[in-house]
Amino acid sequence: MARCALLCVFFLATATSSARAQVTRWGDGCRYAQEGWIVLHLQGAPYERGVQHGRLMAPEIAAYLRCFALTLSDKAPLENWRHTRTLVNALFLRKFDKEYLEEMKGIADGATAAGARFDGKAIDVVDIAALNCWCEIEALPSALAAMPTGLERLAKKDTIPARPMPRFERCSAFAATGPATADGKIVFGHVTMYDLYAANFANVWIDIKPATGHRFVMSSFPGGIQSSMDYYISDAGILLSETTITQTRFNPDGQTCASRIRKAIQYAGSIDTVVEHMTRDNNGLYTNEWLLADINTNEIALLELGTRKHKLWRSSKNEWIGNTPGFYWSCNSMKDMDVRLETIPSAKSKPSTVVWRPSERDIAWHKLYEKHKGKIGPDFAHEFSASKVLAGSTALDSKFTTTALAKDLKTWAVFGPPTGVTRNPTKAEKKKYPEIKPLVKHEWTQLGATPPAPNPSDRLAPMLAKAPALAENDVRWRGTLLPASDADLWLAIAFAEYHEIVTGKDPAKALEACRKNYLEAAKSGDVALADIKKSAASDVWYRLASAKGTLFLHQLRTDLGVDVFDKAMDEYGVKHGGERVTSQQFQQHLETASRRSLEPVFSYWLREKGLPR
């Protein structure tokens, strides 16, 4: 207990001795440095907090994208990144909850507006989704190797050889409570292990106060909507961490792990609801063993989550893996036989071992438990973090919290190798990754969820380069309209084509081209918009509807004002998108929105030939 007291005094001194760090702000968000960590506070609606994130982390997001692309292929990073974007777009993008798609869109827009670029282009939502699915992308080869092809019972060599990736040796974690801890309450800890290049980006401590759901903190990365490390504390009293285990099969119909874990920490209020969020619509990728804790009840649990199968051990039911009352551990070692069966295509083909064998780290965990059982506290977390077996040579951080700390969303953390041995890049790594740098240990510090009060010395998020206004790629109104008759063709066509002009780089130039197109088409036979008839023999009717219809909408936008017109267009498009609409219906909608009669202008543009003088 004396050692524990000394550690607490040391930690307290470390947390309070440093001067106020330089704070950078954007809207309700802010960032500042703390002992190697970038502390990032975000709040508000999904898109709003995403923009804060992108604005405040723009240089790091661009650098992390370069890191991922080079990790995929140091020979052809940009070409491989384009293939990765296609993969993400096809398999993952539509497997996020809408809320998190909006948040990622905000991150992309914020980073782009702050000047961040990748591959010479603006950063978009696919780039950010790829960063959040990094682990799932890495897991795909092993997941596919575990899926049946229908050829498993052939006696001959498999037509499609299974080539699973090596098992991840990443992360160690524990959860202790009740009979195992000094005060009978929770102690919860996690060490992240990862490759050196990416490890230097795993120093983002994010505090999110969403408009809906629970406030939470997590260790994360630039552009992260979820931890990926994984370590979370929510104001509902839920603690979550994980270590990766042997990959199980891929379920292409399931939701991404990134979306499910984010929803769990933001909306779950109990261990049961966490399990429900994680097991529902599971795509199976990034197979993990999740440690869970509820500081309201001091219950801990271990969820081994495969694809269709999962196993839950709970302290409330006295379910212990190795005769360790009050203690669960995790170290990339899959224990449940039913879950292990999901790591092979078939039990009827080539023999595989599905019996759990304790690893070196499993045995080390058991010994550490025996040494400290009944008195586990901060000293236990410190000894675990310094262990060369449990923390390993690839460790990049260590975090631990307690029931008392977690009530205030606080944790003790160290960024850098917790064993104290600096990780230096090899010559080969320097050649592959020009931006790689050593990973050094910082001091232990207490991270939390209390952003600094505004101060005159605070900076605004800098503009890194001259960036285009977001409106250039923005959506001014939504909806795809269908014409109820030929007389309404102009509306269905111009509704979309005028939007392209409004959100383009040079609207004035595009409108002048539109006027010239109309005059050229009119030489072949001008007709009023209401009298246009479709024909397969010529496209003059389409050119007239497009050009004159667009010019008509431009006059309406000029007369009614941009704000009134754009809002009315969006409301109309959202309400009637995919429906057949009439010019009369559209006129009535604009008249209601603008509170004025538009009969003269509609009558002239729809029923007269030519353009207004």
Image (tube, grey):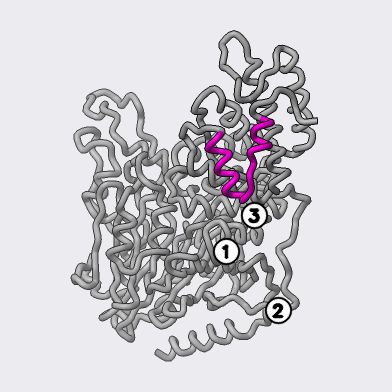
Span colored in magenta: 584-605
Q: Which residue is mark 3?
A: 110
Q: Residue at the location (36% across, 51% down)?
A: 287
User: Mark 1 or 2 closer to N-term?
Assistant: 1
Say which of 292 and 377 sits in front. Answer: 292
The image's mark for residue 455 is 2
Residue 66 seen anywhere in this rendered image of the structure: no
Instruction: Judge from the rendering whether residue 493 lies leftward or rightward of residue 370; answer left or right.
Output: right
Residue 189 in percent (x, y) is at 41, 71
Quadrant that contains the N terminus? bottom left
Query: Residue type at mark 1?
Result: Asn
Q: Residues within 10 Å of mark 2 (few under 14, many from 20)?
A: few
Which marked residue is nearer to the observer: mark 1 or mark 3?
Answer: 3
Q: Residue at the location (76% across, 18% down)?
A: 520
> How many discs mark residues in the rendered view?
3
Placement of 257 over or under 608, stated as above or below: below
Quadrant that contains the C terminus? top right
Residue 47 falls inside the magenta stretch = no
User: Mark 2 or 3 closer to N-term?
Assistant: 3
